[in-house]
Amino acid sequence: MERWRGLTADEMQLLETTFWSAGGSRHGMAERLGFSRSKANALIAGLVDQGLLAEAGLQRSSGGRRAENLQISGSLGVLVGVDIGATSLDLAVLGPDLQPLAQHAEPADVGHGPGVVLARVRVLMRELLAQCGLDASKVMGIGMGVPGPVNFQIGQLVNPPLMPAWDGFSIREALREDYAAPVFVDNDVNLMALGELWRLKRTLSNFLVIKVGTGIGCGIVCHGEVYRGAAGSAGDVGHICVDQEGPRCHCGNVGCVEMMAAGPAIARMAVHAAEAGESAMLAERLRAQGRLDALDVAHAGRAGDAAANAIIQRAGSLLGQMLASVVNFFNPSHVFIGGGITHIGPLFLAAVRQSVYQRSLALSTRHLEIQYTPLGAQAGLIGAGVLAMQETLKVKGVAP
C-alpha cells in the first residue's frame, strides 16, 4: 500500500495512538503523545491529506468548538480476524476501527488437522469479503488465534496438546497463496487479552484473562503489553495440578485443572450424576440427547437442580484454587473470565471468587476484581483484529 511509504516515526506513533485510543480529539492526541498542539495539528493534517487518518463524529463539547474524533481511515482497507477454538470457528471482516462488517461462526474440530480446517477458513474468508463487496487486495492484515502455544515470531504452534497435527505447520504459508497481507498468529487467550486491552484503551496495565472451554488458558497483560514468555507458552495454566489424586490428563500428568474443571470435565461430572441417580433432570436430558455438556448443567442449575449446582460449584472452586496461586504470584488488578463457561452464569463466578479470596493473600486480593469478560464471545475476534492492526502498523515500519 503506497500510502504507508515514507512515514516518519512521529507519524507512525500518531497512527498507533489513534488506533489504541479508539477515537480521540486533536488536542487529546497531542497530550497523549507529549507533542505541542501545532506539531500534532501539522502531523494530523498531513495524515488526513494522505488518507491515513479521518475525522468523524463530533465529541461532546467541554466549552468552545466541539472537537472531532480522529480514527484510522476506513479507505485503507479491512482486517480479517479468525478465532479457531478446539470445537469452533469464528471469522470476521473488520474495519480499522474494529467494527465488524461481516461475521460467521460454525462448529469445527481442530483434530481434523490444519489442511482441512484452514481450507474451510479460506473459503469462509472469501465469502465474508464477497459479502462486503471486497476482494483479497483490500485486506490490510490477518490476525488468527489458535488453542495452543505459539512461537509468535514465526507464527507456528509448538507442541500443542489439543492439536498435535498442527505442530510446526506454517499457517502463514497456507494463507499466503490467497493474500499479500501479513498474517499474524497467536494463542487464542492472548488475543482475548489484546481485545480487552483495546476495549480498555490501555487504562489497565496488569490483568489476566482466563478462557475456560475445552481447555483452560490464561492471557497475561503486564505493563500494558501481552506477555508471551520466553517460548510463547506463558499462561498455560490449564496444566497446573489441583489434585495429586486426580485423573490423568492428555498432557501425561494427573490432576490438571483443565482435566477437572473445563467443559469436558463438567460434562463428565454431569453424566456421572445422571447415571448415579443424583439428578432426575440431567438423567432426562441424557436420555433425550444421548450426551450432556456444560450448557445442560447450566440449564439444570438454573432450574434449581442441586446436583447440577454442586458440579458448577466444584468446577468453579477448582478453577479458583488454581487462580489463587496465579493471583498471589502476579498480583493483577483484574481477572476476566471468558470462553464457553460464561454461559453457566453467576454461580460459577461466585464459586471462583470465593475460592480465590479464601486462598490468596489479603494484599493480593484487596483491590482485585474478578468478572466475566465484558467483550464476551466477541473477545477473541476483536483481539484478532487488534493483533492484525497493531502488527500491520509495526510491519509498515518507519522511513529510513
Image: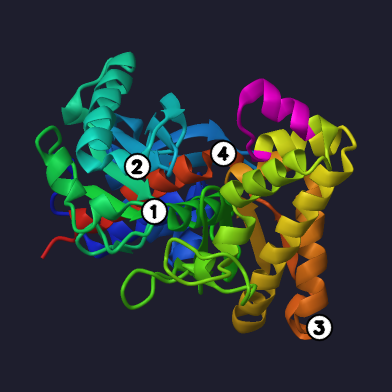
Mark found first going from the N terminus, 4 or 1: 1
Residue at numbered disc 1: 162
Q: Nearer the viewer, mark 2 or mark 4?
A: 2
Give the image location of residue 368, x and y in percent: 74, 70
From which residue to which does the magenta span run?
282-294
Task: Give, as a three-letter code, the residue at label 2.
Answer: Val
Task: Give, as a three-letter code, the residue at label 1.
Answer: Leu
> Quick check: marks 3 and 1 in contact, CB under 8 Å?
no
205 displayed left or right of 285: left
Q: Quadrant of residue 291?
A: top right
Q: Residues within 10 Å of mark 4 (few under 14, many from 20)?
A: some
Give the image location of residue 313, x and y in percent: 79, 55
197 displayed left or right of 164: right
> Quick check: marks 2 and 3 in contact, CB under 8 Å?
no
Helix, strand or loop: magenta stretch = helix
Task: Give, as a three-letter code, the residue at label 4.
Answer: Ala
Mark found first going from the N terminus, 2 or 1: 2
In terms of secondary structure, where does tag 2 sit?
helix
**Residue 374 visible in the displayed image:** no
Residue at numbered disc 3: 362
Mark found first going from the N terminus, 4 or 3: 3
Q: Tell me the quadrant of the picture where the N terminus can be found.
A: top left
Q: Quadrant of residue 89?
A: top left
